[in-house]
Image (cartoon, helix red, strand yellow):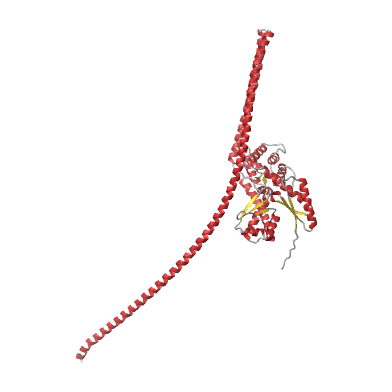
């Protein structure tokens, strides 16, 4: 039994080794198959990833190309806008150059006239010197002749000589006294010039003459058609609501707003910008936006006045004064902006007062408020200096300031040294080259008179002078003026303008009668 078991053990061991080898072989083949499948799967994933990456790459390239094209278009638009700005600036520079050349020619003419005057003075001085020498010679001859004829004694001659010497001494003393007085006047004049020059240098600022047009840039040329509207109804409604002439010409992406009243022109500019941004441009919307902009601008006037007073260091001012100071921004005097002019006069007065040991705050306040009378309604008659003085009294300003305002054009006597300071500063600010233009003031007065003549007729609601005074548009009340009376009213206004005004060319009178019926569906 043991012998049989002994022989079975090697057989069992060999059989176990066979099965172990068989298991290892099978496992090895299975592993190789899995590796082959995994490698095949990895190759498929890599190919799919490559295709996906190529697709994403193409999409990104398309996006980059689109973005580049859009940026290119924006750059071209910006470049065109800059070119338009440069063209406008070049035109302004050309106009300024022409103005400077004209002034240069005037200065040359004045210099020539001055040289001729100096030459005539020199010739007169030479003739005068020759005559004085001749007079001295005649006096000497007459003295010798008198000595021979008179036969005076030595004592008489001595007495006469002493009297002559005394007379000469008195004459010399009088001449020296005159020279001393002239020197004192010259010194005083130089000191005054020093104070004024120092004030001017410390407040040096640029000046530009106010124009009667504003240029409004458009987003595109298509906007011009929307502004005009069907058969021109939008532009007519806008001009009737604002009193400003809208000029649509060949200027690229721009329209021109023309009117003599800066406040109306600013209302028109802001209203048109609002309408273009909103996109709804029709007569009803135009009237709504214009009225809203007008109210907002009146609020802005108060803020401008308040900020101006703070900038120049003036406090404790009545609210009505603040509002009137803000109105100066939309007023001009001979083409010079009234607010800029008044602020400059205030600074000049303050600096000169400090140099003369006066109170700079009082001087600055008087200078800033000296033209406050120009902000009143233009229908109020009277010199603006006296009107401003009455305003200052009403709002309890200092008596020195009241007198300085009323006397800066010599309408009343000056009562303090601050009054001549205001007068001098006003003259300095207005006399600088390019600060004022006389023709603009006359132009504005002519347009105001044109509007006032039309307003004086019964049934007239509003009047607007447009086209640089070549046309006046009259809005009448439809329930008081019918079509027949409208024709007669146009003829009457034209006849009155012809009789009472002087103007170049001709003036067109347009009477507009409009009836609106409005109902709401609820």
Q: Is residue 377 visible?
A: no
The residue at 74%/61% (across/down) is: 516
Foreground pick, 290 / 415? 290
Q: Is residue 8 visible?
A: yes
Foreground pick, 363 / 398? 363
The residue at 63%/58% (across/down) is: 224
* Above or below, 68 relative to 42: above
506 to the left or right of 346: right
Task: Residue 90: give x, y in percent of width and height.
Answer: 57, 48
* Above or below, 419 relative to 64: above
* Above or below, 321 relative to 424: below
Rendered-image quadrant of the C terminus = bottom right
Q: How many marks?
A: 0
281 to the left or right of 17: right
Task: Residue 119: give x, y in percent of width and height.
Answer: 62, 28
Furthest toward the left, the residue is 3
Foreground pick, 207 / 369? 207
40 to the left or right of 11: right
Task: Residue 309: give x, y in percent of width and height.
Answer: 63, 47
Q: Quadrant of residue 356?
A: top right
* Above or below, 4 relative to 226: below
480 to the left or right of 145: right
Q: Quadrant of residue 519?
A: bottom right
Task: Residue 327: give x, y in percent of width and height.
Answer: 67, 49
Rendered-image quadrant of the N terminus = bottom left
Furthest toward the bottom, the residue is 1
Foreground pick, 462 / 493? 493
């Amino acid at each position: 039994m043991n012998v049989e078991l002994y022989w079975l053990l090697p057989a069992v061991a060999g059989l176990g080794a066979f099965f172990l080898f068989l298991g290892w072989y099978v496992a090895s083949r299975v592993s190789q198959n899995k590796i082959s499948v995994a490698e095949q799967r990895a190759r498929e994933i890599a190919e799919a990833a490559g295709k996906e990456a190529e697709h994403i790459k193409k999409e990104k390239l398309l996006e980059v190309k689109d973005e580049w094209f859009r940026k290119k278009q924006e750059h071209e638009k910006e470049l065109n806008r800059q070119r338009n700005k440069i063209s406008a600036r070049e035109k302004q520079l050309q106009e300024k150059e022409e103005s400077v050349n004209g002034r240069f020619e005037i200065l040359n003419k004045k210099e020539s006239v001055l040289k001729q005057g100096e030459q005539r003075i020199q010739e007169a001085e030479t003739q005068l010197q020759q005559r004085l020498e001749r007079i001295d010679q005649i006096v000497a001859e007459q003295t010798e002749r008198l000595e021979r004829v008179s036969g005076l004694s030595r004592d008489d001659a001595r007495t006469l000589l002493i009297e002559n010497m005394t007379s000469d001494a008195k004459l010399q003393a009088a001449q020296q006294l005159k020279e001393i007085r002239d020197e004192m006047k010259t010194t005083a004049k130089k000191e005054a010039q020093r104070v004024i020059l120092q004030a001017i240098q410390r407040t040096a600022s640029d000046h530009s003459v106010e124009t009667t047009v504003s240029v409004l840039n458009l987003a595109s040329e298509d906007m011009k058609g929307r502004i005009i509207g069907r058969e021109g109804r939008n532009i007519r409604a806008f001009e009737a609501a604002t009193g400003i002439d809208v000029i649509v010409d060949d200027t690229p992406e721009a329209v021109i707003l023309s009117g003599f009243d800066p406040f109306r022109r600013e209302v028109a500019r802001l209203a048109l910008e609002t309408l273009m941004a909103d996109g709804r441009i029709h007569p009803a919307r135009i009237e709504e936006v214009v009225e809203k902009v007008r109210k907002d601008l009146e609020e802005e006037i108060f803020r401008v006045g308040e900020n101006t007073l703070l900038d120049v260091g003036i406090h404790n001012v009545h609210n009505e004064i603040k509002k009137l100071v803000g109105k100066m921004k939309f007023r001009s005097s001979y083409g010079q902006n009234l607010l800029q002019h008044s602020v400059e006069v205030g600074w000049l007065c303050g600096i000169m007062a400090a140099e003369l040991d006066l109170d700079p705050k009082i001087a600055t306040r008087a200078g800033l408020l000296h033209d406050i009378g120009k902000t009143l309604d233009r229908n109020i008659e009277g010199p603006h200096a006296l009107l401003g003085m009455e305003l200052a009294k009403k709002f309890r300003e200092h008596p020195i300031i009241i007198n300085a305002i009323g006397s800066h054009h010599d309408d009343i006597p000056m009562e303090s040294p601050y009054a001549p300071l205001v007068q001098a500063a006003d003259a300095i600010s207005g006399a600088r080259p390019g600060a004022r233009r006389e023709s603009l003031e006359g132009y504005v007065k002519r347009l105001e008179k044109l509007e006032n003549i039309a307003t004086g007729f019964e049934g007239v609601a509003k009047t607007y002078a447009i086209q640089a005074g070549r046309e006046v548009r009259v809005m009448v009340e439809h329930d008081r003026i019918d079509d027949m009376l409208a024709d007669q009213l146009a003829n009457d206004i034209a006849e009155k303008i012809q009789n009472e005004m002087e103007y170049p060319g001709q003036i067109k009178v347009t009477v507009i009668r409009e009836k609106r019926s409005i109902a709401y569906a609820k």
